[in-house]
Amino acid sequence: MDIQEILAFLALGIALAFLIKKFFFKKKKSDKDCGSGDCGCS
């Protein structure tokens, strides 16, 4: 394997890790009521 293939697979791995983290490991912040503005997350 040359350096271009290694960099391509590395970029693919980083992109997949980001997407998996974004969609499957959501934080549980939905418990708070952010609609009223009491939690300060607006």
Image (tube, rainbow, N blue to C red):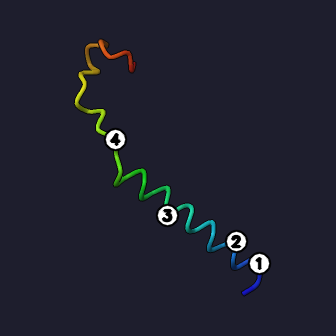
What quarter of the picture does the N terminus occupy? Answer: bottom right
Contact between marks 3 and 1 (CB within 8 A): the answer is no
Q: Which mark sits nearer the N-terminus, 2 or 3?
A: 2
State the residue at coordinates (69%, 77%): 6
How far across and down, in percent of the image, does residue 19 sit? 45, 57
Residue type at numbered disc 3: Leu
Q: Amino acid at mark 1?
A: Ile
Between the residue at mark 4 and the residue at mark 2, the CA separation in whole angstroms equals 31 Å
Q: Secondary structure at mark 4?
A: loop
Q: Disc 3 designates what residue?
A: 16
Secondary structure found at label 3: helix
Q: CA distance from mark 4 to mark 3?
A: 19 Å
N-terminal-most mark, 3 or 1: 1
How many C-alpha atoms fall within 10 Å of the one at disc 3: few (<14), some, or many (≥20)?
few
Q: Nearer the viewer, mark 4 or mark 3?
A: 4
* Residues under numbered marks 2 and 1 in contact, where contact means CB atoms less than 8 Å apart: yes
Mark 1 → mark 4, Cα distance in angstroms: 36 Å
Left-right relation of 18 to 31:
right
Classify mark 1: helix, strand or loop: helix
Find disc 4 in the rendering and name its residue: 27
Q: Residues within 10 Å of mark 4 (few under 14, many from 20)?
A: few
Considering depth in this image, is 22 or 28 the residue closer to the camera?
28
Q: CA distance from mark 3 to mark 1?
A: 20 Å
Residue type marked 4? Lys
Residue for badge 1: 3
Residue placed at 76% from the left, 84% from the top? 2
Q: Give the quadrant of the C terminus.
A: top left
Q: State if disc 3 and disc 4 touch (CB < 8 Å).
A: no
**Numbered disc total:** 4
Q: Please give left or right for residue 5 compared with residue 22 in the image.
A: right
Residue under label 2: 7
Q: How far from the left and from the top, in percent, is residue 18?
A: 50, 55
